[in-house]
C-alpha cells in the first residue's frame, strides 16, 4: 500500500489509466459508498488527463436512476430497494458501456434520466474518440451485472461512519441557505441524512459488499478517509500494465 499527497494519488491514477491498453475507449469505474469522494476524485483525474491532451467523457450513475416511484417501491428507506431497484443498469449498458466497449460503434449517451424533474432524458448521441477515457462515478458499479464491462475498476474506500459525518457536514449549510435559515435548514437536512444513511445507504452498501465483494474485483483501491493524505493499493492484475 502506498501513502502520499492528494496530488500524488491523482498522478498515480492518471498513470494507471495511461498504461492500460484497449482497442476501444477505456471504461473506468470509480465506485464507492455515498459521500466517499468519488465525484471529486473522478473530476480531478479528468482534469489531469485533459491537460495531457486525452479526450475524457465524464458521467455518473445518478443520470441512470429509474423514476422515483420505481426506486422507492419497497419504501424510501429500504436497503434492498436502494441496491436492486434504484438504477437502470440495462440502459447504462445499452447507451454507454456497450457502445464504448469491444465491437461497439462508439456512439454513446451519458444520461437517460433527469433526477430533478423525475423524467426520462434522451440527449443527442455523441461519438467517442477511439482512445477516449470514460470516467464514470457511482455506487454499486462492481456488481455482477456490470463488473465485466469496465476496463479499469477503482474503488474509493471510506468507513461508513465517516461517510455519514461528511453527509452531515454537507447538510449543515445547504447551497443557497442564508444566515437566517442555515441553522433550521441544516437541522432538518441532518435529520433526513441520518435516517437515510442508517436505514438505506449504509445497509445497502453492506449488502453490496456481501453479495458482490467489490474490494476483490477492484484494480485500484483508494483509501479516502483522509482527503489530503490518502493511501492507495494497485492490484497486480490486468488491465493495469506497467505497475
Image: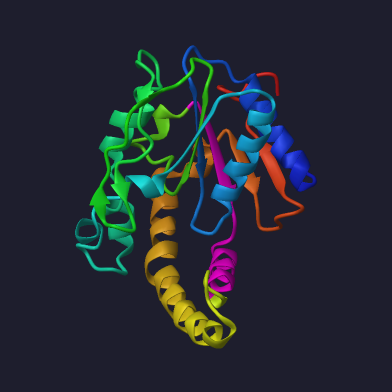
- 158 in the magenta segment: yes
Q: Quadrant of residue 95?
A: top left
Q: In which quarter of the image is the N terminus?
A: top right
Query: Residue 58: x, y in percent?
Result: 50, 37
Q: Where is residue 8 in the image (x, y as percent from the top left)?
A: 77, 40
The residue located at (42%, 42%) in the rendering is 141
Q: Locate residue 33 relative to residue 78 in the image: left or right.
A: right
Q: Is residue 105 above or below residue 52?
A: above
Q: Quadrant of residue 111?
A: top left
Q: Position of residue 230 (x, y in %)?
A: 72, 50
Residue 71 visible:
yes
- Residue at the image position 58 percent from the left and 53 percent from the top: 37
Picture residue at 32% right of the left edge, 69% below the top: 77
Q: How many labels does the image show?
A: 0
Front-lying residue, 108 or 157: 108
Which color mode does the image show? Answer: rainbow
Q: Which residue is drawn at 29% across and 59% down?
A: 80
144 left or right of 184 in image: left
Which quarter of the image is occupied by the C terminus? top right
Residue extent of the magenta highlight = 151-171
Q: Is residue 166 magenta?
A: yes
In this view, the residue in front, 182 or 213, is: 182
Amino acid at each position: 500500500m502506498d501513502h502520499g499527497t492528494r496530488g500524488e494519488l491523482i498522478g498515480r491514477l492518471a498513470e494507471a489509466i495511461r498504461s492500460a491498453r484497449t482497442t476501444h475507449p477505456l471504461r473506468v469505474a470509480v465506485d464507492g459508498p455515498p459521500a466517499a469522494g468519488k465525484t471529486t476524485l473522478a473530476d480531478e483525474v479528468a482534469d489531469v488527463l485533459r491537460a495531457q491532451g486525452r479526450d475524457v467523457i465524464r458521467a455518473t450513475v445518478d443520470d441512470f436512476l429509474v423514476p422515483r416511484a420505481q426506486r422507492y417501491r419497497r419504501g424510501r428507506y429500504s436497503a434492498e430497494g436502494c441496491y436492486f431497484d434504484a438504477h437502470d443498469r440495462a440502459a447504462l449498458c445499452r447507451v454507454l458501456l456497450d457502445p464504448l466497449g469491444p465491437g461497439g460503434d462508439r456512439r454513446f449517451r451519458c444520461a437517460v434520466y433527469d433526477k430533478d424533474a423525475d423524467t426520462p432524458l434522451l440527449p443527442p448521441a455523441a461519438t467517442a474518440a477511439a482512445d477516449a477515457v470514460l470516467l464514470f462515478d457511482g455506487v454499486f458499479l462492481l456488481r455482477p451485472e456490470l463488473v465485466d464491462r469496465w476496463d479499469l475498476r477503482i474503488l474509493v474506500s471510506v468507513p461508513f461512519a465517516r461517510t455519514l459525518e461528511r453527509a452531515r457536514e454537507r447538510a449543515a449549510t445547504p447551497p443557497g441557505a442564508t444566515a437566517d435559515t442555515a441553522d433550521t435548514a441544516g437541522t432538518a437536512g441532518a435529520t433526513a441524512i441520518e435516517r437515510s444513511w442508517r436505514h438505506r445507504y449504509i445497509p445497502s452498501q453492506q449488502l453490496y459488499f456481501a453479495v458482490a465483494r467489490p474490494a476483490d474485483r477492484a484494480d485500484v483501491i483508494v483509501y479516502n478517509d483522509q482527503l489530503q493524505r490518502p493511501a492507495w493499493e494497485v492490484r497486480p492484475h490486468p488491465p493495469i500494465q506497467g505497475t
